[in-house]
Image: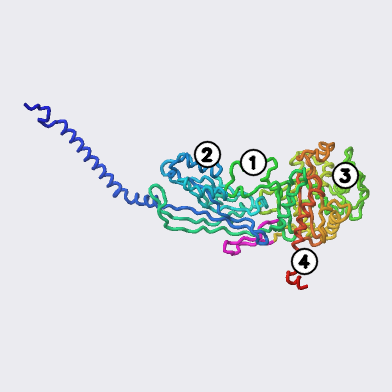
Amino acid sequence: MVDSRLGGGVDPGFETRVGVIAAAVIVAFILFFLRLVQLQIVEGEDLQRRSERNSIHKQRVEAPRGEIYDRDNRLLATTRPAYGVQVLPSELKRRQVTLATLAELIGADYAALEERVGNPRGRNRFKPIRIVGDLTPDQLARVSTHSYALPGVVTDVRPRRHYLYQALGAHMFGTLGEIRADQLEARKFTGYRSGEIIGQTGLESILEGHLRGREGGRVVVVDVAGREVDLIEEVDPVPGGSVRLTIDLDLQRAAEEAFNEVEEGQPPKMGALVAMDPRTGDVLAMVSRPAYDPNSFAGGVDTATWNALNGDEWRPLHNRAISGQYPPGSTYKALVAVAGLEEGAVSAQDKVYCPGHYRLGRRVYHCWKRPGHGKVNLFDALKGSCDVFFYTLGRTLKIDGIAAYSKKFGLGEKTGIEIGPERAGLVPTEEWKERVKKEKWIEGETISASIGQGFNLATPLQMAVAYSAIANGGEIYTPHLVLERRERDGTLVSMRKPELLRKIPLSEEVLAEVRRGLLAVVQEDGGTARRARVPGVLVAGKTGTSQVVNLKRTEDLEEDEIPIKYRDHAWFIALAPVENAEIVVSVLIEHGGHGGSAAAPVAQRVLAAYFEKQNPPPEIIEPLPELEEAR
């Protein structure tokens, strides 16, 4: 007997299951067919366009920034290749080991690298992540040598701004930085992209459009993962145009070196210097200290450097030459002297007795020379910087009379130099005090104003412009830094010509009398700036000391006991040669003390460098060895 349970018949449940499976297969095929119809027929053209866009990628290639030269066509700023490190997350087979190795090779923090790479997903896994933008030669060598142990790590090269002399001229060049969101929205930056490095301050900002150049590009084919598989087209970038400055590298170096020279036990020199051609307005040198290395900003400044610069109490990013506002001190006396002679308030022969003090009502105003200068005329007063003489003259002119001439010389207004932010300084008047201070002007304030103290404020650049007018017969030129701009191929774009703002109607006899007094300040015994002398050149000038705090606060202290921030500022302004001057040098040493000892030697270095170039010593030709032997 055969047991029916062993297969004597067909299981009806089996047939049902087969039918369900078959139906499911048929439905699946129908769905696949309908989807295929949708993709191929209904959406075919659109998907084809999208596919082409996804498979062909355009890559931006940065353009080198234009080069910057000094007036003698010596290179100051150029572009160099910067080697960077990128990570391809999709290729990081042993992520922790690779990143730890990379961190050790480049001296980076492992945790920082992990955070930088993050955890990209999808197509982002195939996009390179830039880890370091500028490897040192040692770092590059180490990474290249150990590339076998760094799967997913690649190096690349991009153009990077390079300043050949580090901090030299830093405030002129300014800073570079990543374009900000608000700048991207401005019409001026149409065509710029997020992440671009642009000029943010100084000449780099003013000349951004000319220096930027035109980017290149590559058109490549990538696979579905975003990896490059073929190059279709490549367009080389066009470097930016070049710029030739008015700056003379030799004078700039001499000025920088003079600021670097510090006596043992003394703090570093802070302040500013402007050297200018009074005949054209060409700025021959410009220094602001403390400074910074603009190379730190070339690829976008890192957070640590930015915080250090902004947190420094001495404000190294501040351009003191154009925006440092200081009481001009006794350098102001030359302008008051011009005003007095022009207005007939004093003659060259008039004398004033200086007992070392001046009394106005119940208040006594001291001369810097406590024993006094005795009887002095204008010449003597300029030579010895007699305060009492100018107290007397100031009271005669009154504050508005002094202010009128100060403004003619360009004080109280911006000079118009290309770079910024420039400050206008302050020339006080009776109307100004009533409007701003809501108080009446008092006569004692005229006493202080007549020697460049009180409310008076001026920048080193403004004082260079004012003394240029004393030197050149009363002409006020707009100071400038850019001589010419050229395209990369040498085509001239623009050339700057001297821009005469105005001619002050001054008597040549008056200017000659003032220059005679300024000449004695440097060239005669008893002058306050003998340390500014240059052999063979008649240098004229004026020293000045501007108070930082009330004298009562420091009068009982020795000079080296006074905290640096409370010490007086030191001024010296020179013009040379005294007749037909070719150069004016304005120096301000913050908290430097006396103009004759702190500022005059700095100016002397620049003057000496200038006249050595104009009249170089005769070349000494050594005899050839064979000729010497023949003798």
Q: Position of residue 283 (x, y in %)?
A: 71, 56
Front: mark 3 or 4: 4
Q: Is 280 covered by the magenta stretch? A: no
Q: Position of residue 43 (x, y in %)?
A: 32, 48
Nearest to N terminus: mark 1 or mark 2: 2
Q: Which residue is mark 4?
A: 618
Marks 2 and 4 sit apart, C-alpha to C-alpha, by 61 Å
The residue positioned farthest toward the front in the image shown: 629
Q: Height in image: 101 above or below 461?
A: above
Give the amino acid type for the residue marked by disc 2 in the picture.
Answer: Tyr
Give the amino acid type for the residue marked by disc 4 in the picture.
Answer: Pro
Q: Which residue is mark 3?
A: 367
Q: Residues within 10 Å of mark 3 (few under 14, many from 20)?
A: many
Q: Which residue is mark 1?
A: 308
Q: Which residue is mark 2?
A: 110
Magenta range: 479-497
Marks 3 and 1 sit apart, C-alpha to C-alpha, by 42 Å
Residue placed most toward the observer, 587 or 405 = 587
Asked if the residues shown at circle 3 and circle 1 are in contact, with their CB atoms under 8 angstroms apart, the answer is no
**Quarter-wise, where is residue 508 in the image?**
bottom right
Looking at the rendered structure, the secondary structure element under dot 1 is helix
Q: Is residue 373 left or right of residue 58?
A: right
Nearest to N terminus: mark 4 or mark 1: 1
Residue placed most toward the observer, 338 or 619 = 619
